[in-house]
């Protein structure tokens, strides 16, 4: 067996920190309404790559942010992500039955409870972001709450999902596809990076531009790779239904560019992401490694 790399150990340690926080702070299943709390915990705990939380932790390392603040930010962002997956899987949207290698939330708990679980996970994210002290300057904390609200709302993830649903059976140009994914997938990835970097020392305006460029580029790269994996991998490897985009006749990077060019594009985006981090060297090591992980992942 090959020994775990330093990056693996780093990510495992922080995933454990995240998991402990989630276990402790998600409402307990003994509290009324028990079944809703079961559904919320089912949707969040024990699954997923935790890419967005890790991005928040890694961005926090640029600014010497305290792990306690980063954990709250990371957990809140994962709640928003989990809620989006629960709603995305509903019959009214993607109508999927498998997620993270388990039945989807509505398959296990019914549609009504899955809807409520998604809604209440979203509320809980903002509860945590406003309840814990994340920064000595309260304006900075307000900025974080505001950023996450925009990223998950109609100008971000929710809006991107609406455009995605409208695009079924239609053709999109590459710039239109990119604009959709910058919202649907990119906005939350960007928020993870920016919120993590908001928990510590202030960045200069130039550093903020570079970090923003990294976050946008990586958000796009994440989606390009997601499209490639949907076309290339099988359901067992992905833990969710493979080949869904083609079956639903959705425009993707693979349908527009072809598989080989989509892969080339993801590598080009990876190079751009790395270049954006140059001003932060060597504090940006984890952000570099996460970019590599996102582009080279197989699930
Ligand atoms: C009702 C306002 C409102 C919004 C609903 C459903 C929805 C918003 C948004 C859907 C957003 C969505 C599901 C985007 C797909 C992003 C994506 C590629 C998810 C998969 O992420 P991974 O691979 O999943 O990080 P894991 O399971 O590893 O966490």
Image: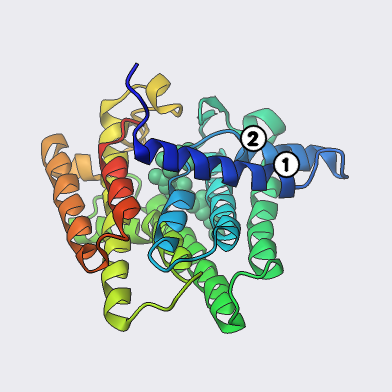
Left or right: 47 as drawn, with respect to 268: right
Is the N terminus in the top left, top right, bottom left or bottom right quadrant?
top left
**Residue drawn at the location 33% of the way across and 54% of the way down:** 287
In the depicted view, which residue is nearer to us: 195 or 90?
195
What percent of the width, then of the height, locates residue 174? 19, 56
Q: Is residue 97 above or below residue 32?
A: above
Q: Is mark 2 within 8 Å of ligand 1?
A: no
Crowd rating for badge 2 (residues with CA inside 10 Å; few <14, some 14–19, many 20+): many
Name the residue carrying label 2.
Answer: 106
Could you classify mark 1 by the number of other residues whose Cα lies within 10 Å: few (under 14), some (14-19), or many (20 or more)? some
Determine whether label 1 and label 2 are within 8 Å by CB. yes
Find numbered disc 2 in the image and state the secondary structure of the residue it sits on. Answer: helix
Question: Which residue is located at x 21 percent, y 40 percent?
Answer: 255
Q: CA distance from mark 1 to mark 2?
A: 7 Å
State which quadrant residue 160 falls in.
bottom left
Q: Can residue 220 be seen from the camera position used here?
A: yes
* Local SS, label 1: helix
Q: How many marks?
A: 2
Q: Quadrant of the C terminus?
A: top left
- Is residue 26 visible in the rendered image? The answer is no
Q: Earlier in the sequence, mark 1 or mark 2?
A: 2
Percent coordinates x, y for residue 89 in the rendering: 53, 39
Q: Please tell me which residue lies in front, 167 or 189.
A: 189
- Residue 207 location, x and y as percent? 29, 75
The numbered disc on residue 164 is none
Q: Position of residue 248 (x, y in %)?
A: 36, 36
Residue at the (52%, 50%) spot, across then down: 81
> What residue does disc 1 label?
113
> Is 32 situated left or right of 225 in this image?
right
Q: Which residue is at 41% across, 55% downward? A: 58
Please indicate whether residue 65 sits to the left or right of residue 205 in the image.
Answer: right
Q: Is the residue at mark 1 in contact range of ligand 1, meaning its CB lies under 8 Å from it? A: no
């Amino acid at each position: 067996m090959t020994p775990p790399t330093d990056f693996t150990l780093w990510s495992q340690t922080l995933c454990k920190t995240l998991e402990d926080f989630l276990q402790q702070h998600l409402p307990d299943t003994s509290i009324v309404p028990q079944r809703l709390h079961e559904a919320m915990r089912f949707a969040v705990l024990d699954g997923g790559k935790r890419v967005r939380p890790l991005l928040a932790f890694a961005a926090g390392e640029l600014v010497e942010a305290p792990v306690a603040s980063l954990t709250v930010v990371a957990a809140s962002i994962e709640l928003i992500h989990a809620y989006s997956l629960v709603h995305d899987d509903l019959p009214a949207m993607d109508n999927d039955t498998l997620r993270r290698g388990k039945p989807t939330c509505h398959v296990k708990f019914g549609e009504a409870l899955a809807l409520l679980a998604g809604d209440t996970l979203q509320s809980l994210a903002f509860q945590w972001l406003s309840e814990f002290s994340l920064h000595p300057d309260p304006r900075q904390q307000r900025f974080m709450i505001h950023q996450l609200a925009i990223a998950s709302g109609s100008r971000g993830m929710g809006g991107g999902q609406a455009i995605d649903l409208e695009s079924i059976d239609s053709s999109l140009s590459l710039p239109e596809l990119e604009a959709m994914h910058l919202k649907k997938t990119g906005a939350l990835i960007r928020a993870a990076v920016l919120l993590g970097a908001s928990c510590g020392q202030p960045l200069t305006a130039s550093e903020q531009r570079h970090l923003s460029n990294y976050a946008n580029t990586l958000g796009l790269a994440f989606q390009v790779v997601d499209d490639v994996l949907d076309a290339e991998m099988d359901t067992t490897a992905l833990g969710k239904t493979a080949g869904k985009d083609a079956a639903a006749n959705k425009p993707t990077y693979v349908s527009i560019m072809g598989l080989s060019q989509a892969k080339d594009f993801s590598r080009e985006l990876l190079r751009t992401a790395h270049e954006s981090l140059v001003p932060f060297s060597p504090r940006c090591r984890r952000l570099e490694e996460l970019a590599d992980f996102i582009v080279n992942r197989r699930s």
